[in-house]
Image: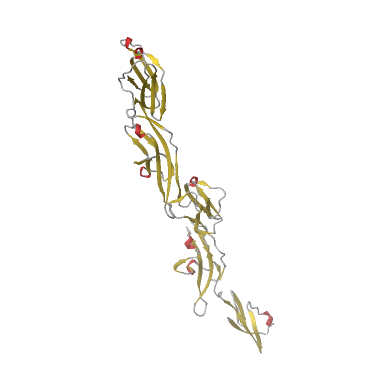
Amino acid sequence: MEFYCSYQSNEDKGHLQWCCDVVTTSYDGHKLRHKLRCANVVWMVVSTCLGVHKITLYQHGTELIPISKKDPTEGKQLLITCDGQSNPAVTDNDVTWTKQNNSTFSMKGKQFVISNVNRLDSGTYVCYVVIKLIPSVGQPIDVTSRTTVEVDVLYRPTVTITPNYTQFTVIENKTNLQLDCIMADANPHVGTFRWYKNGNIIDGFTDASYTISTVWRTHTGSYTCDATNTVGSSGPSSAVQLDVLYGIELYSISKNNQTEGKTLTITCSGQSYPLMTSSDVKWFKQNNNTFSSEGLQLVIENVNRLDSGTYVCSVVIQLAPTVGQPVDVTGSTAVEVEVLFKPSLDKTRPNSPSHISATENNTLVITVTIISNPTPTIEWAFKGQAVMNSCNFSTILSNTTTNGFRTSSSISIDNVQSSNFGEYTLTARNTIPSRQKTSL
């Protein structure tokens, strides 16, 4: 902006004071002519021979105060003031706020306020100031100024956990199983991670990944993670339930002794995950290709001595991991079954008849075979003809041998005499409440 002033006076020309920079000065007779260029002039006085004139100049635009970067925390209040030097002073109506790359955002007023700032409020905001300069002479002029401010909203992390399964199953002995705590969003970046099993912190793990070198069944549990930055903690992630699948460890079954005619019940049990079901278990009998039964329990009603033997519990279960192919695993255990029964005459073996005729002076052998489990005790007794009406028996020594369930017992009489004629009785006893008596 340039001003020209004519000055006519006999006075010293140095008495004329300008608040603007004088570009050129010339003198023509009694007239002093100044050419000035003024910037940021508030006011100046021009003297002439006729008196003093005050010329007021308005500032060209507004000198806005720079605004430093703002780093509010999400959920808090964001307050930014746009102000500067101007004449006339800036008012709320002179100021408009906009946001770069957001054509819909607009706000009036010197103060820009967001009461509950959100991460989406991050960005560059522009303060536009438009003021009207109204000179005494001439037309009003709108002058504009602008300044920008960067807003970076800080917020705590958001995390998710992978593998992204509510229930994640793996087979025992799997190596290098990795769980990852994925930072979905955070500002500023995450400083540390923490891992939890069943709600308890896992010491020594502060990285985004948690690796189990070899998976054991003891690793079964609910796993979560969280992340922390300077704003705070994300809170726990969604949980992944880690279930470890493992094969069958069957419990040994002790020998089972059952009395003939009773019900035999044997249970096959053990450890596995998933748990064994009745459809997983089959029973077989050694040396018997026709026997087969299914279920956790082997039940034989009215058990018979022929049911004695060795039974095998065979289990097949399928381990189906979340990732990968199913695997069938097997296990088996054996149990010996011994059916107990009272002594009885084994009619499948030769036995002496119940009535025997003998000749004096010859040798007489009397043999009886008993089948029994457990092995019986054998007792022979004799009652002669002369005392048949008596209840008195005399004990006789015998020769007894046992092979499996069969016990053979015999007595031998050399040089038979009439005194040897009479009733011979064999009594067999075992632990089963009963006894077998055979008279000859």
Relative to 438, does residue 199 appear above or below in the rendering?
A: below
Locate residue 85, reporting x and y percent: 56, 69
Relative to 356, does residue 310 appear above or below in the rendering?
A: below
Quarter of the figure with the N terminus: bottom right
Q: Residue at x 36, y 37 (%)?
A: 298
Locate residue 27, reporting x and y percent: 66, 87
Locate residue 182, reporting x and y percent: 49, 57
Quarter of the figure with the C terminus: top left
Relative to 88, does residue 384 appear above or below in the rendering?
A: above
- Please give left or right for residue 43 compared with residue 393 in the image: right
Question: Which of these two is toward me, 376 or 317?
Answer: 376
Q: Is residue 300 visible?
A: yes
Locate residue 118, reporting x and y percent: 47, 59
Question: Which of these two is toward me, 211 or 125?
Answer: 211
Q: Is residue 110 visible?
A: no
Question: Which of these two is toward me, 381 or 243?
Answer: 381
* Farthest bottom residue in view: 29
Count of marks, rendered view? 0
